[in-house]
Amino acid sequence: MIIRLLTLKNLQYVMFVGIASLLFSCSNETTTEGDDKQGNTEDLETDFKIFKAKQIMYSLPSPIETAMLLKRAGAQYNEEILNKLENINKYTTNKQMALNLGVYSADLSYASLYDQNQTSIKYMAASKKLADKLGILSAIDQSIINRLENNVNNRDSIMEIISETFMNSNSYLKDNNRSQTAAIILAGGWLEGLYISSQLIKSTKNPKELTSRIIDQRISLGTLINMLEHENKIPNEDITTLLKDLGDIKAIFDLIKVSNEDIDPVVTKGDKIAKIQGKTEISYKDEDIKKLVAKIEDFRNSIIK
Amino acid sequence: MKRFFQLFLIVAALSVIPFIGNAQCKNFAKKAKIELLPFIHDGIYNATVLSEGETAELYKTFYSGQQYRIAVVAEADMPKVEFKIMDAKRKVLYTNKEKDFAKTWDFTLESSQQLIIAIQVQTVEQLQSDIAKGCIAVLIGFMNEEDKIQK
């Protein structure tokens, strides 16, 4: 019956709609050579000329990676700076829920890396609640919380579980054409990591390393802005307002002088692992860091309220 | 009316094809995480469906002092995949083509910087009726240094 239905005219129509829907599903992830502002692709040219579209992906430091960087920088644990669990009922819009799912994920990662097991379980439950409200089906189910409870003494397992839940969330959203929401969650997680770092420099005895990590985030901020602009090709008011706030943070980051980035990195092969060499010198005024910390605090508090 | 309904069903069936592909990609990416061990996956889902000859690029900031592993894994029936690591000025720092298309590369950095992971599915020289197409996962892992020291 289906074959009989496919007369030439119908077939053309079906093929047109099918191809259009296939193209639409990829449209916000591809760029052509002509509008590629990141650079050229001549090194990657091949004799395969039909498909010229190049897919662009942006990857931010995940909450678990940020927490790891914090710990390596000598930061201490301070539960007071986490977003309070009781705030969860305030989040009703898609933007609030998505940003604060990122925030709670970052808090969860931070707590778990400092072996705060009960806090980790509570923040995982809060993340589950927000993921459920956002309709991210099965990203965090009861079995994940049980696994977390059963592995409280194994930090590698806990990190693996958190990494898995984060991947479940962002893959579910991207697969269901909700990459804008996925981007907002990532933005929330990134901002909370920056907020935690900026709060901890106030209480850290030697904040140089931590300050350096905060300054490093200027590079990720550029990636985040590129990612949100990419997502905003289909205009989204939530993303537009986020971009404005992030632009204000970027303006303060831009006050920090970074030099010697022109040195070409060279890969050296050590005993076991390659090392990309290339020094960067950074100079800043303390008042600029204070300004940055204050701006981050304002922005983060506006998100969690 | 009946014909319109039948036509609608076919169009609807064609429209879900990309989502089926995406779901397969997600499951593939989850399985591919094994390539990162003993590094811990950062939790970010970077996977896409590519055909032979197609390219993709991933932009990510990597931090000094941290040990990283990049794994670029393609489905079994795909042609070989080249991946290059470039700095922000697109200077090539590593290419797996010189390492027999190795799936992973481990490295550390002296200073934090944005790197570009450029991937390209190689073309198949023999003439084939179908264009090879499949899922490719770009996975980033980092080493839990603290545990490594303790162990």
Image (cartoon, coloured by chain):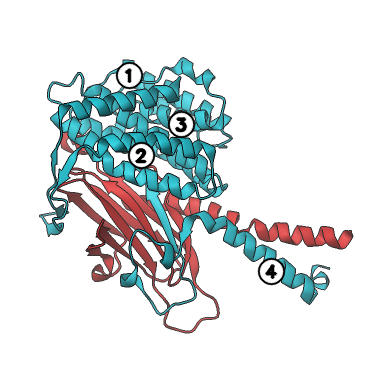
The residue under label 2 is which amino acid type?
A: Ser
Which percent across, then down, holds residue A111? 33, 24
Residue matched to label 1 = A81
Helix, strand or loop for disc 1: helix
Mark-to-mark CA distance, 4 and 2:
40 Å
Dots 3, 1 in contact, CB < 8 A: no
The residue under label 1 is which amino acid type?
A: Ile
Mark-to-mark CA distance, 2 and 3:
14 Å
- Residue in the image at 13% along x and 30% along y: A208
How crowded is the residue under tag 4: few (<14 C-alpha within 10 Å), some, or many (20+)? some
Mark-to-mark CA distance, 4 and 3:
39 Å
Residue matched to label 4 = A15
Tag 1 subunit: A
Which percent across, then down, holds residue A140? 50, 33
Which percent across, then down, holds residue A13? 74, 68
Residue matched to label 3 = A99
**Mark 4 / mark 3, whichever is N-terminal:** 4
Mark-to-mark CA distance, 3 and 1:
17 Å
**Mark 4 / mark 2, whichever is N-terminal:** 4
Tag nearer the camera, 1 or 2: 1
For the N terminus of chain A, the quadrant is bottom right
